[in-house]
Image: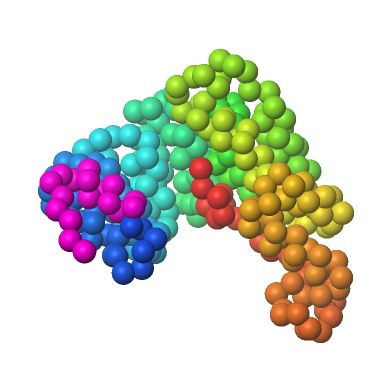
Amino acid sequence: FEILYKDATSFVSAFFLVQHVTFFFPIAFVDKAISLNQQHAFSHYLRGSILLTSHRPDHAIVSFFRANDIQRDIPSFEGLVESYLAAGKFKEAICTAKEAISRCSKDARAVTLVGLALAQAPTSQQKGEGKDRAKRALKKALSMDPGSMRPLFCLVDIYASEGEYETCVKLLQDGLENCGKLNEDQLNNASAFSHTSTWNKEHADVIYVKLAEIHTYNEAYVEALNCYHVAISMNPHNGLAVQGLERLEKFMSGLDPDEAEGGDEVDDSEVKGGGRQGDGSEGYHY
């Protein structure tokens, strides 16, 4: 079918309407929007997001850089930092994150970007202090916005990679407590704080899934099982919870979670732990 569009915004809107239809190529809509208005920051941002999702970080950097050049806001800084990290350009990621702080020093998301960049950068580039600096940045972000998932999960992943599972459990339990401690002023605040806090309150099931993963790494399988059940009871559509529960039940039955049904039983030592710790960039993004 054929529709006439007169401005960039209508093309971007059209993208959202048809993004799930296979015979449309989403980036073509964004390119058309940019051709109509090259100063349309969100079009460049959206183009960068598509390219990053398509595992083309080097190309995504160009689009996010353009979006940031037109409108220096946190989303464009986030896109730039994530693209630099995906492309292995850690120095650029750290510098960009620091620039975000210089422009938005009171925004927890900007502080979080520094923590994310430091957490992923090779130790050799940071004189062995990267993880500690990342922890400090992420803790500061959490103190600014106790309801934010991203610094919480990244901080948990750092401690999990060091085997400090009790610290991880404490952090996640604190996150769950924060879900129920939001006061009316925080919820009514129009800043980024209220947005992330409200998200946290409505999606505590995600924290329970993360808690279940940590319990699994720590071989506390009964606690992990309980956390998965709580997450599913809160949100039956949480795919990570359903998948995690299925894998854990297989493992507790002596089966390899990675094998199809009917596979041979395996020794506990072969599957103990059930996975690896990440860097805050896997799974949910907030």
Q: Does residue 56 lie above or below 181 as drawn?
A: below
Q: On the rendered structure, is 46 left or right of 171?
A: left
Q: Does residue 57 lie above or below 141 as drawn?
A: below
Residue at image position (48%, 52%) is 121
Judge whether residue 12 is colored magenta. yes
Residue at image position (63%, 49%) is 157
In x, y percent, where is residue 220?
85, 54
Q: Does residue 22 lie above or below 284 as drawn?
A: below
Q: On the rendered structure, is 281 left or right of 214?
A: left
In x, y percent, where is residue 2?
17, 61
Judge whether residue 15 is colored magenta. yes
Q: Nearer the viewer, residue 15 or 173?
A: 15
| Residue 220 seen in the current view | no
Q: On the rendered structure, is 219 left or right of 95?
A: right
In x, y percent, where is residue 197?
57, 30
Q: Quadrant of residue 77?
A: top left
In x, y percent, where is residue 14?
27, 51
Q: Nearer the viewer, residue 145 or 102?
A: 145
Residue at image position (56%, 15%) is 185
Q: Quadrant of residue 150?
A: top right
- Marks counted in the figure total 0
Q: On the rendered structure, is 157 left or right of 4?
A: right
Residue interval drawn in magenta: 1-17
| Residue 106 seen in the current view | yes
Q: Nearer the viewer, residue 54 or 13?
A: 13
